[in-house]
Image (cartoon, rainbow, N blue to C red):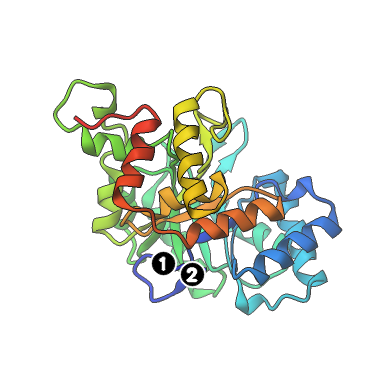
């Protein structure tokens, strides 16, 4: 399994993070088998959030770890907090502290390796975030910190009040949702792709050694569907299938390889609960696409090169 260095740490982690948002689609035996299989493949990084399954995914993961006799110390577990579904986002000190205690209880662990703030809170007081980070770190409950779906200046505002580095930023990225890449190509143009909607977050993260964790790597739109095999993207699928045949892998492997080929050394968050598809994702992490292949895939998705 390809590894990367997480943020500004010296921690080596798998380039594939196992996303646990759909873990509760499995029963306890299925979850145990899935988690054990992932660890056997070298996938020891697991991504959670307190809202996944309304907390049931974290509880199920704890049972799976116990049933499979997996050593907690061999895993890197991250979780996220801040979303109060359907009501608000909340980065207040009280909410962060209460959320982490809930996460630890459900995961049946004394600490998590990284806590991410889950989407920006317009009413956030960065001083309160900083206070929460400090107390969580000093108590040993959280070892590292990150964010999700944040622009550079939102991260800078947090950094102004804390000495803790932001190690990761979870951002939506796929071949068909590549806005952070297109606006880098179409600079100073009037095309749709030239619109900078994220404050050049890709370049910012690279400049500041913040690991981009790419979520929904196989989706188009906002959870509208998977582009692989979709009638909406015939040219893209034809190109992916052609390249997949060359490497003797699946289309899933090539879509994975496309993201991990970027020199930002991103970490891709898988969302599948299917062991075979997870194996295909792992295969993709071992492939380094040729430059021309990467661009051919990019163009086949309807993107342009000015």
Residue 103 spot, x, y in % from top left: 65, 59
Residue 159 higher or lower than 70, as above or below: above
Quarter holding residue 172? top left
Q: Which residue was labeled with disc 1?
A: 6
> Residue placed farthest to the front in the image?
246
The answer to whether 140 appears left or right of 67 in the picture is left
Tell me whether the residue at label 1 lies in contact with that at label 2, contact meaning CB atoms closer than 8 angstroms.
Answer: yes
> Residue placed farthest to the left in the image?
188
Using the image as rendered, state which of residue 17 and residue 298 is in the foreground: 298
Residue 55 spot, x, y in % from top left: 71, 50
Using the image as rendered, state which of residue 212 and residue 143 is in the foreground: 212
Q: Which class describes the residues within 10 Å of circle 2: few (<14), some (14-19), or many (20+)?
A: many
* SS at circle 1: loop
Q: How many marks?
A: 2
Residue 163 spot, x, y in % from top left: 32, 66
| Residue appearing at x 56%, y 41% in the figure | 83
Q: CA distance from mark 1 to mark 2?
A: 7 Å
Residue 113 higher or lower than 215, as above or below: below
* SS at circle 2: strand
User: Which numbered disc, 1 or 2, marks the residue that appears first in the sequence?
Assistant: 1
The answer to whether 297 appears left or right of 30 in the picture is left
Q: Which class describes the residues within 10 Å of circle 1: few (<14), some (14-19), or many (20+)?
A: many
| Residue appearing at x 69%, y 46% in the figure | 22
Residue 194 higher or lower than 50, as above or below: above
| Residue appearing at x 47%, y 41% in the figure | 242
- Decide if residue 84 is in sight here: yes
- Decide if residue 79 is in sight here: no
Q: Which residue was labeled with disc 2?
A: 13
Quarter holding residue 196? top left
């Amino acid at each position: 399994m390809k590894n990367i260095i997480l943020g500004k740490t010296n921690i080596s982690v798998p380039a594939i993070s196992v996303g646990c948002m759909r873990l509760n689609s499995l029963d306890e035996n299925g979850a145990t088998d899935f988690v054990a299989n992932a660890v056997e493949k070298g996938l020891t990084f697991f991504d959670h959030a307190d809202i996944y399954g309304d907390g049931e995914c974290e509880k199920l993961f704890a049972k799976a770890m116990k049933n499979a006799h997996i050593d907690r110390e061999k895993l890197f577990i991250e979780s996220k907090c801040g979303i109060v579904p359907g009501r608000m986002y909340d980065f207040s000190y009280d909410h962060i502290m209460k959320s982490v205690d809930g996460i630890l209880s459900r995961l049946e662990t004394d600490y998590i390796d990284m806590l991410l703030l889950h989407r920006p809170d317009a009413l956030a007081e960065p001083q309160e975030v900083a206070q929460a980070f400090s107390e969580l770190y000093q108590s040993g409950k959280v070892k590292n910190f990150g964010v999700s779906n944040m622009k550079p200046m939102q991260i800078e505002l947090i950094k102004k009040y804390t000495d803790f580095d932001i190690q990761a930023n979870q951002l939506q990225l796929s071949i068909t949702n590549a806005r952070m890449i297109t606006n880098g190509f179409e600079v100073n143009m009037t095309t749709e792709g030239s619109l900078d909607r994220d404050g050049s977050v890709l370049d910012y993260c690279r400049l500041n050694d913040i690991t981009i964790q790419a979520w929904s790597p196989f989706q188009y739109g906002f959870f509208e569907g998977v582009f692989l095999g979709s009638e909406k993207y015939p040219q893209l699928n034809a190109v992916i299938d052609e390249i997949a045949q060359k490497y003797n892998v699946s289309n899933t492997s090539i879509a994975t390889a496309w993201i991990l080929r970027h020199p930002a050394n991103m970490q891709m968050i898988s969302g599948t609960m299917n062991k075979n598809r997870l194996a295909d994702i792992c295969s993709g992490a071992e492939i380094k696409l040729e430059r021309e292949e990467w661009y051919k895939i990019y163009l086949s998705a309807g993107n342009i090169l000015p």
